[in-house]
Image (cartoon, rainbow, N blue to C red):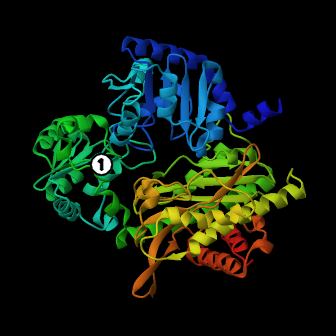
Amino acid sequence: LIVRDQFVSCGIWRGKMQALKTASAKLTRLRSLMKQHNLAAYLVPTADAHHSEYLSEADKRRQYLSSFTGSAGTAVVTDQSAALWTDGRYHLQASLELDSSAGWVLMKAGLPTTPTIEQWLISSLPSNSTVGFDPLLLDQSTYLTYYTAFKSHPLKLEAVTDNLIDLVWGSEKPAEKREEIRSHPLKYSGVSSKDKIKNLREILKKNDARGYVATALDEVAWLFNLRGSDIDCNPVFFAYAVVTLDKAVLFTEEFRISNAAKEDLAANDILTCPYQDVFKEVGNLGKNGGLWLDPGKTNHRLFLEAGYLSNSSKLVTQESPVSLPKSIKNQAEIDGFRNAHIRDAAALIRYFSWLEAAVVDGQDLDEYTGAERLAKFRAEDENFVGLSFDTISSVDANGAIIHYKPHPSTAAKIKHGQVYLCDSGGQYLDGTTDVTRTILLPGKSDRSNQELEYIRRCFTRVLQGHIALALAEFPPGVSGLQLDVLARNPLWADNLDYRHGTGHGVGSFLNVHEGPQGIANRNVPATRVPFVPGMTTSNEPGYYEDGKFGLRIENVVVCVDTGKNWMGTPFLKFENFTVVPVDRQLISKDLLTKREIEYVDQYHLLCWNKVSPLLSSYPDALEWLLKNTQPL
């Protein structure tokens, strides 16, 4: 009973109970279709045709089938089993949302005892069984991983043109969004699309390539200085781009391109063609050789069209030539980031001031109404376009669900003395924000003094990791894999850790998660990319105890030159964009070093200097900022 009550409080259990009515029926229908196609297993990745992290409602096939709402994971269905692989951010959430009575099994990816998808299929299926997939939804790198693992056992990997989940979904499947495509002005982008295309062509020549196919939606938007709204919280639109040595083509529906955007495209010598024509274009270009496709971002269908089965040696299969230039922000973008974060901080501070006052007054609040009020504060900004992701507004046990999303019917009440974790951000014309703060709400807590002191100790360890990364100075060539240990080391001192990355790139009025760089303790391509000046990243260590609390501190930072060097080698560091105070009530000052105390005091002075001028008309928020930026 205690466990069940706990689930009700986290806002997931009730939604799960409703989903039980259809989970078995969906699997039964899917298995019937698998049998018709002679498939022993079917892969359901979290993906669209562009390998997007965040999906439109029409592309949330894995969520529809499994009821798991997290943003990452792969479902695999056989005649006897249904399994879902997801990473450590979602282990708790998936365990609550999956319907075990329908046969769903959670595979906790990243744990040493968890087999990979290919290992599990090899051990589960008879030899010569066929594993089916939609070639639009599997990127080429993942396809090759499966293909290589399966061929010696053997299992067959078969592309199925009809998406079986769509057939199960039927008429209930949401319609695809095709919203207006708008220009992104030069005052925000900093570089014209003509110059971006020129630079791309120089990269193509250096790599003996004749053309590049951009499939990632943020790459298309960045390259052509366009923005859209086909995916919630992401200012992108469904399209492909092909740039060769003599032409640049945007593949999308022309009817939705604004007149201003059409003029900009024409002025920058960019042609437009229907969305589906990209497959024919890629087929023609592939015959001539020298076509560049990024296997990690390009779907298997496009590789088939390019003729990789017959002339793979003629293709250039390397990481995107657009990804790195996009990640290195120019001065206009850096200025936009800085200004957007200051205004965003003012909105968040107004929210925290309002929230604490409402708690003291005993108002009836919950996690959902809190998130809605925060969105209203942000929306007052004239450059505000929308949220950069669904707000994580969570109290106590819900804070341990790393990507928790409150729902109006099940959100937990916000009350005095709770630990409140708020991870949120906005999309502004001049920048994208992403900030997490954990605060101790005013009033008497239900926890014992011993429990509160333990939480403060854990929070302070998180803060020390955050400070260590913020203060790091490092030579060129250092990547996120090397930097990650700085953020975890203070936690390790108390035998603590967290199951998510420490930092992700952030787009410039683009996706809140951006590569190619990243900070994490996993040896993957993103963590091997060296940081260079102009790259943005989040700095977000955390700590979580299931059923109890979650703690995280997140700033968005930019890599800059320190002005120092060693034997002529310039050193680098991170500079904060985010200017929101850290909750002093949760800090155990006795654990901090003198340098760490100095950092907190200097950071809080920065917050006061940057944000207080924007709060002159909001005396309560200004008082909150003053109180929370006092020296330790």
Q: Quadrant of residue 466?
A: bottom right
Q: Which residue is more in the foreground, 2 or 419?
A: 2
Judged left or right of residue 199, residue 177 is right
- In percent of width and height, residue 109 lies at 56, 40
Whether residue 618 appears in this view of the structure is: no
Q: Which residue is more in the foreground, 343 or 50?
A: 50
Q: Which residue is more in the foreground, 3 or 510?
A: 3
- Mark 1 neighbour class, 10 Å CA radius: few under 14, some 14 to 19, many 20 or more: many
Residue at x 63%, y 71% (from the top left corner): 467
Q: Amino acid at mark 1?
A: Asp
Whether residue 293 appears in this view of the structure is: yes
- In percent of width and height, residue 407 lies at 62, 37
Image quadrant holding the N terminus, namely top right
Q: Which residue is more in the foreground, 101 or 196?
A: 101
Judged left or right of residue 109, residue 352 is right
Check the image and report above or below for 69 versus 264: above
- In percent of width and height, residue 357 lies at 75, 58
Location of mark 1 (residue): 294
Kind of element beneath mark 1: loop
**Residue at the front extreme of this rendering:** 152
Check the image and report above or below for 535 versus 240: below
Instruction: Tell how many labels.
Output: 1
Check the image and report above or below for 126 versus 314: above
Check the image and report above or below for 342 versus 570: above
- In percent of width and height, residue 22 lies at 57, 18
Residue at x 64%, y 29% (from the top left corner): 15
Q: Quadrant of residue 597?
A: bottom right
Image quadrant holding the C terminus, namely bottom right
